[in-house]
Image: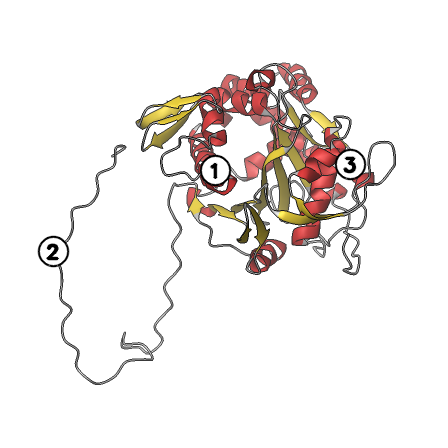
Amino acid sequence: MSARTPRHATSQRGYFSRARGVALSVLSVVLFGTSAFAIAYNDIQGNIDRHDITDYLGDRPTAAGSDVADEPLDPAAGRPINILVLGSDTRAGEVNDEYGTTPEGGQRSDTTMIAHISADRQRVEVVSIPRDSLVTIPSCRMGDGTWTAPQYDAMFNSAFAMGADGGDLGTAAACTMRTVEELTDVYIDDFVIVDFAGFINVIDALGGVPMCIPEPISDRRAKLELEAGEQVLDGRDALGFARARYNVPGSDGSDIDRIGRQQQLVAAIAREALSKNLLTDLPALYRFLDAATSTLTTGTELGSIPTLAGLAYSLRGIDLENIVFETMPFEWAGNRVRPAAEAETLWQALREDEPIQGALNAAGEEPTAEEPEDDTGDGTGDDATEEPTAPPVTAEPEPAPTSICG
């Protein structure tokens, strides 16, 4: 890591493992409630490719909430959680191979988000890290026990590619986690890797995602052809929307521009997922979990079905306005970006489990900052004078622009 004084994290393994007993009981009742539970549980658990990367992480930041005296009975309360969500652009495997080859071969983290889940389970903050960010990549341990040399001013997504030497997703995730922790000083509890096929499966298992497309999009490289208007995107169109960079109206073709559309899409996914009453439709829930986990790669703890079920159950009542999206503040460095000084304020909020403002919420709205309270008692504020002021001149209101989606 950097020259900072190493701080050893309080182990979080107990956080997830202590929850398994209760979460498993809840899952057995809520999910299946019959003798089919064991079969369904084993089927879904067997879908997930889990990696124990503990030995690859080295010295780490201190986890928030590690001073809580009483461990929660399940993952539904008590501790904030930070999950690193990685979108792999691998072309290996069915469906993935339909999208050609990556320019350098191998695989990269095309999308990286930190999903911060508050300790009270009332908020989720999702922060995107641009893949073209110039960062320090610390020394990373490989599967054969060797360590890579640290890199400076390196492209952020090269951490995943470097760690994946030999195709090991566990070491790819570990190197990316170390890079994120070096950048943010935020403790990352676990990770999820989703490839193209997995993303398509999740969307199709939901029955598609309703989206408003303001103008037609035609991006041959992303295999995307969309008409303008309100429509339901299936898995392949949703993947194309997330990947599109060229011939997109109003787009400059940059990765930064694409991040905004990805956040809009994830917000729409959250709306659709929360609108589905899956907990009372057991066959639909099983089909969703079976499809959603079919190409999922995680750490050993988050990849436990009881943990996933308990965490999802604890978030079932969250308000869409409290699922907030933001991008790491940055400064341009040619056609790359560097973290801006303002990014530290964002990382501090995640470390301290404090709300962030964000640029978008899952309701599809731009969050608005609260107006400062007027403490003068007369509504005039501190700068008020006794001089009378002329009434403001009001112009004729302009007609509100019409949206193709209403």
Q: Is residue 19 visible?
A: no
- Which residue appears at 14% of the width and 75% of the height? 390
The tag earlier along the polypeptide, 1 or 2, is 1
- Quadrant position of the C terminus in the picture: top left
The amino acid marked with disc number 1 is Arg
Residue at the extreme bottom of the image, as rendered = 386
Q: Mark 3–mark 1 contact, CB under 8 Å?
A: no
The amino acid marked with disc number 3 is Ile
Of tags 3 and 1, the one toward the viewer is: 1
Q: Is residue 62 visible?
A: yes
Q: Residues within 10 Å of mark 2 (few under 14, many from 20)?
A: few
The location of residue 301, given as percent across then percent down, is 72, 35
Q: Residue under circle 2?
A: 396
Nearer-the-camera pick, 264 or 308: 264
The tag earlier along the polypeptide, 3 or 1, is 3
Q: Residue under circle 3?
A: 53
The location of residue 281, given as percent across then percent down, is 48, 21
Q: Residues within 10 Å of mark 3 (few under 14, many from 20)?
A: some
- Which residue appears at 74% of the width and 26% of the height? 167
Q: Residue under circle 1?
A: 258
The tag earlier along the polypeptide, 3 or 2, is 3
The amino acid marked with disc number 2 is Glu
- Which residue appears at 87% of the width and 37% of the height? 146
